[in-house]
Image: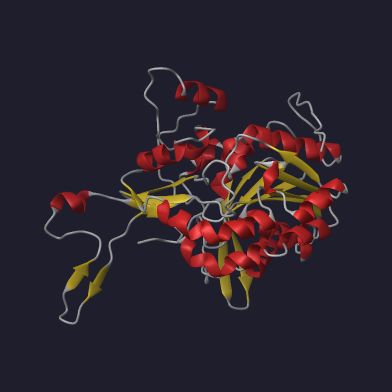
Amino acid sequence: MLRSAAPLLILRGAGLELSLVVSLPKRSAAPLALASECQPEKQILHPLSHQENLAQSHAPGRKRDFSPVLWSQYFESMEDVVVENETGKDTFRIYKSGSEGPVLLLLHGGGHSALSWAVFTSAIISRIQCRIVALDLRGHGETKVRNPEDLSAETMSKDVGNVVEALYGDLPPPIMLIGHSMGGAIAVHTAVANLVPSLLGLCMIDVVEGTAMDALNSMQNFLRSRPKTFKSLENAIEWRCEGAASPECPKAIVEGIIEEEEEEEEDDEGGGSVNKRKKEDDTETKKEHLYTWRIELAKTEKYWDGWFRGLSNLFLSCPTPKLLLLAGVDRLDKDLTIGQMQGKFQMQVLPQCGHAVHEDAPDKVAEAVATFLIRHRFTEPIGGFQCVFPAC
């Protein structure tokens, strides 16, 4: 049974929920970011540094380790933010790090969760003074809302504004919205609607209206090509690691995108029960716990057009300083090309990355964001970080 409760590749099994970060294929123009999430249970952590992980993953003759790691290796705290309105309460899961500086409010792509930002968070916190708030959007991760199927741009942007108000009241600190793919579109809609009054900057990661709209036609085929289930968390991580530029990311993100597949029992007219998942006479099959995606992205298709149509002009209309990070310059559409030539936003291309740029190259994305913030004097560098200002 597919569930829509997580932001990363969501697998659930054997009473344990963990999330995987799943990105689209290299150089894919697809506008949705795929992933899912699960609740972390007690796990043995592997507190290796990013460099140690990379070195060990590529060591000749060494068996690769696909064990998941917990969110606490990358974030300092986790909490649930309750938003009340006239119809009841919604609860939004957030992960936080940092104690001073501007707030970087991170919005993940479709199918991912806040854990998509795990490795990026460690990278950015070590470079500049800032605070991280990574949010599980509705229908994803551990966020629980009354209508998780409503993934319209209007509803999700209002969610972002409500979470900011619940966290900071009438005097929010300076906030920069950073969004990947779908999350980038929601960041723009949030900014245009002035739902974050203390907004100081806006960053979209690998989302461009023209490319996204063109890619929507092939998205269903891509979703059908993915594995429907995984036999274990390690199996899901191994699948995600194939071709991944950063082998550390999948291990950190698995907790948000997959969950244990649940058995469904229905009473038939004769009062008997029918198990749709497993054969009653197969004891070995009964013992198997399969993991599956938390959110059925295929069912969100009716919202895709609303996320991306008109996005380029909306982005250009935002009066705050803007940053666009892309996996390839070929992704630019006409409006953004003209806007970039007119100096309306800063753009940086990070080649040799897939669609989930912040997962494939977390250090490079952290450097780009840190440099942007320092250039505009929104924060100060720490740890000896040296800015290298891009040409564009």
State left or right for residue 166 relative to residue 224: right
Quadrant in the rendering for residue 45: top left
Q: Nearer the viewer, residue 313 or 150?
A: 313
Rendering coords of residue 135 (x, y %): 61, 53
Question: Which corner quadrant holds the N terminus?
Answer: bottom left
Q: Nearer the viewer, residue 135 or 349?
A: 349
Residue located at (79% from left, 28% from top): 388
Question: Is residue 372 visible in the rendered structure shown here?
Answer: yes
Residue located at (81% from left, 56% from top): 316
Rendering coords of residue 349 (x, y %): 71, 38
Farthest left residue? 281
Residue located at (60% from left, 51% from top): 108
Count of marks, rendered view: 0
Q: Is residue 60 above or below residue 167?
A: above
Rendering coords of residue 247 (x, y %): 50, 32
Rendering coords of residue 320 (x, y %): 84, 53
